[in-house]
Image (cartoon, rainbow, N blue to C red):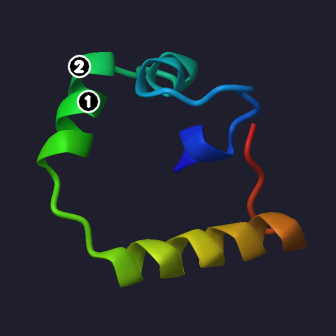
Amino acid sequence: MAGQFCSLERKSIDQIALAIIDGNVRAMQRFLSDTTWETEKMIAKCIIVSLMMISGILMVP
């Protein structure tokens, strides 16, 4: 999720992977294409992380 919250203007898989320490473009592409997503859990996690960022509990570089 760090890549989604980073300061990149355009967020493609390649740019996010390259912006993250030890990011691997091919591994991220495979992860996103091969993973079965549980939508409700992902939305809940995004809300929690967003609230933590807003409250200052979580800092994203």
In space, the residues marked 2 and 1 are separated at their CA atoms by 5 Å
Q: Which residue is mark 1?
A: 29
In the foreground, 60 or 17:
17
- Marks 2 and 1: CB-CB under 8 Å? yes
Give residue 11's position: percent from left, percent from top: 58, 30
In the displayed structure image, the side of residue 28 where residue 23 appears, left or right: right
In the foreground, 20 or 41:
41
| Residue 3 position by quadrant | top right
38 to 12, vertically: above or below:
below
In the displayed structure image, the side of residue 45 where residue 40 appears, left or right: left
Callout 2 amino acid: Arg
Callout 1 amino acid: Gln
Q: Which residue is mark 2?
A: 26
Give residue 55's position: percent from left, percent from top: 87, 73
| Residue 40 position by quadrant | bottom left
In the displayed structure image, the side of residue 17 where residue 54 appears, left or right: right
Residue visible at 17% across and 33% down?
30
**At numbered mark 1, what does the secondary structure look like: helix, strand or loop?**
helix
Quadrant of the frame with the C terminus = top right
Crowding around mark 1 (Cα neighbors within 10 Å: few <14, some 14 to 19, many 20+) is few
Q: How many marks?
A: 2
